[in-house]
Image (cartoon, grey):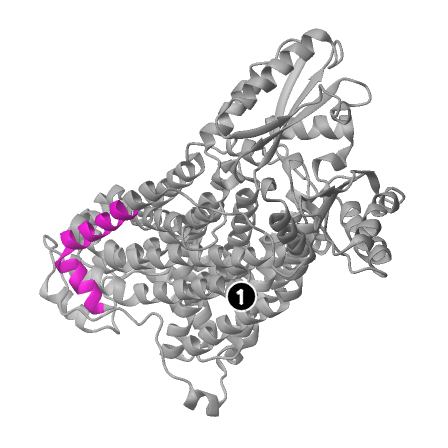
Amino acid sequence: MAAIARWCIKHRLLAILIWLAALGGTAAAAGFAGSAYSNDYEVPGTESGRATELLSRGFTDLGGDTDTVVWHTTGSTVRAADVEQTMTRTLHAIDDLPGVGAVTGPYGAEGAAQISEDGRTAYATVTFDRPADEIPVAQAQALVDTAKAAESDGLQVELGGTAIALTEAPSAHIAEAVGVAVAAVVLFLAFGSLAASLLPIATALVSVGTAYAGIVLLGHVMTVADFAPMLGMLIGLGVGIDYALFIVTRHRRGLRQGMSVADAARNAVTTTGRAVVFAGATVCIALLGMLILRLSFLNGVAIAASLTVVLTVAASVTLLPALLSLIGMRALSRRERRQLAEHGPRPDLPTGFAARWSAFVERHPKLLGGIATVVMVVLALPALGLHLGTSDQGNNPATATTRQAYDLIADGFGPGVNGPLTIAAQLDGADDRLALDSLPEKLRTTEGVASVSPVTYNGGGDTAFLTVVPDSAPQSQETSELVDRIRADVLPQVQETTSLEAYVGGVTASYDDFAEIIVGKLPLFVGVVIGLGCLLLLLAFRSIGIPVKAALMNVAAVASSFGVVVAVFQWGWGSELLGLGSAGPIEPFLPVIMVSVLFGLSMDYQVFLVGRMYEKWLETGDNRRAVRVGLAETSRVINSAAVIMISVFLAFVLSGDRVIAMFGIALATAVALDAFVLRTLLVPALMHMLGGANWWLPGWLDRRLPRISIEPPDCAVEHATIPGARVTEEDVASMERPTERPTETSTEKEHDVRGIPG
């Protein structure tokens, strides 16, 4: 690390230019290549996956995205002459739009089913000539504009579908801008220096921008979900600013202690930079743990997010020291520079509120530990009712055209029309065809079925499908139960005496199968992530108790954040007020991604807090002193970092994307609880109660484990001075005697937490 820091400081302009070239090059390549994201939740081998494969082989004309135009009248019916003329003209105009393959309206012999019983609502289906992820936003927007042009008094026109949702995505990165702005304010308040507060922002923006463009390119070589770049940016901005904050804080401390700019920057990278690399590695390990699930959809998310973390860590230990050497002494505020010039170097003492709080925790560990435990348990209780399923456009904000189209169809035709099930069948002979022809009648008498379409055969007669409309919404538990009922009771009756192979597909079936796969593999995934994290902490702190407590704290943070997500999104507590739409189930892939990210982020604070305690334990062998001093010396920077990360994560609620908003609230909650409840209350309280057992390690294991150092003490700098500071020979002599602190005032001695007897 020292060699990297020296090179970046010596060749600071070259280091900066290399990063700018990387950002510009990847951005240009991404702009030229374009995006190629895919939200393919199908899992090969599942029943819904086999249904999709059958349809794609037997019906090559079903590949285009299908969207819906819905209109509703208030003063007349949709069959009124003026309404019919207006909408017929509109549908012809839509049919002529680029990219539109077919339009099926209600005004014809076969369209009666597309008009509601009360005659006030009708819909038309618009089929594009390509899948949704290949449709340009401009084509979808043209469809919206053409349909909306028909609106008038008494005639409401709304649109729904996957392609239409593309037009509702926010065009400006408001969330990122708000998060960065809040982070800049917090950094300025923490540092008092504009130059120092801008460096973490600049480092994070360069690294995250490079990663964002890299994720766009990654989508061309593997399956990457459309929310992966946003998720990577969310994580990258949070950890990138925080990692830079830790290094800049160490650099500023070195300057105040009398180091030169170059020595302070090198020392910050050599010490805190190593902790940043270790923390980043834990985040990447947690994220890459998703690879053991062997789901292509999650593989892309894991690699995309890990790429972002790797680049933020790399920028923190290369670009940041170059920038620190560039701004020189301006990393300190004017007041700090003035005091340094007048009084010379002075030691940083853990005083003030941080010291008082640390001593308070030491005096009342059982009480504070109990309060923290109660808070975490209460917040985690809603997680017991977690329901995984598909949120759909019925969960969009009430003002969105997709939400209004969803509600109009549900009110006019029943909620199941918004998410029909598809039964795909492979036939071999006349007996199979007879059996399949009898299936619609059996389905119509099945509980939970609203209607069934006739069987549609392909040209070769070897593949067929029919559509089943449930009488419940796609995301409801009743629809999931209907899928199970058809699979377990109805289809076996038809297949038992034939060679017919039939499978249930559709949105609800696909999500249910996906959720079942994830839930089945979740224990293995969590076990691997916890095991690897504990192994890293075991190597770093040479203790059995530290990794075990870290695992328990991480589980507590995850459970409590899940509880908050369930309350907000599944129970709907404030979701409409926040513009996040109505209550609905939690996405099946969310638990896995959240566990990965939350375990990684929780390890960060564990490393920075316990790392300082471990350093003091090695120095003194006094557990109470180590815990007290470690908490006092790290709590301020950890709390500042937490406020920044919380601000960045909460800002992503403004993204307009329900999934990203879920991540934002979950991560913000977890970081808040981790920093302000676990690390400042529960962890130090437990460590005080356990005493020397915190650092116990069997002798045989101690001899076999390799020795690594996360954050070594400050590098020695011989006679470090600051240009312009009035440092006398007496001051130099005092710096050579580390056991004395002659620059300490009587007030500082009184409140220095290190002076309290253990």
**Badge 1 amino acid:** Val
Residue 402 at x, y percent in the picture: 61, 30
* Residue 335 at least partly seen: yes
Q: Which residue is most to the right?
A: 445
Segment colored magenta: 2-26
Residue at x 57%, y 73% (from the top left corner): 689
User: Based on the displayed image, in which of its 4 quarters is residue 397 positioned?
Assistant: top right
Residue at horizontal 42 percent and vertical 68 percent from the top: 756
Residue drawn 47% across and 46% down? 37
**Left or right of residue 673, residue 421 in this image:** right
Image x and y of residue 290, in percent:
52, 63
Judged left or right of residue 292, residue 710 is left
Q: Position of residue 745 (x, y in %)?
A: 28, 59
Residue 351 seen in the current view: no
User: Quick check: 746 above or below 214?
Assistant: below
Q: Report which residue position mark 1 lands on.
A: 683
Secondary structure at badge 1 equals helix
- Image coordinates for residue 189, horizontal then vertical, percent: 35, 43
Is 259 a magenta residue? no
| Drawn side of residue 715 relative to residue 212, left or right | left
Q: Quadrant of residue 156?
A: top right
Quadrant, the C terminus? bottom left
Chief SS of the magenta region:
helix
Question: Residue at horizontal 48%, vertical 40%?
Answer: 134
Magenta-colored stretch includes residue 18: yes
Count of residue discs: 1
> Which sits in the foreground, 246 or 595?
595
Taking the view exactly as shown, the residue that stands out farthest to the bottom is 700
The quadrant in which the N terminus is found is bottom left
Of the pair 629 and 287, the residue shown nearer to us: 287
- Residue 35 vertical placement versus 628 (above, below): above
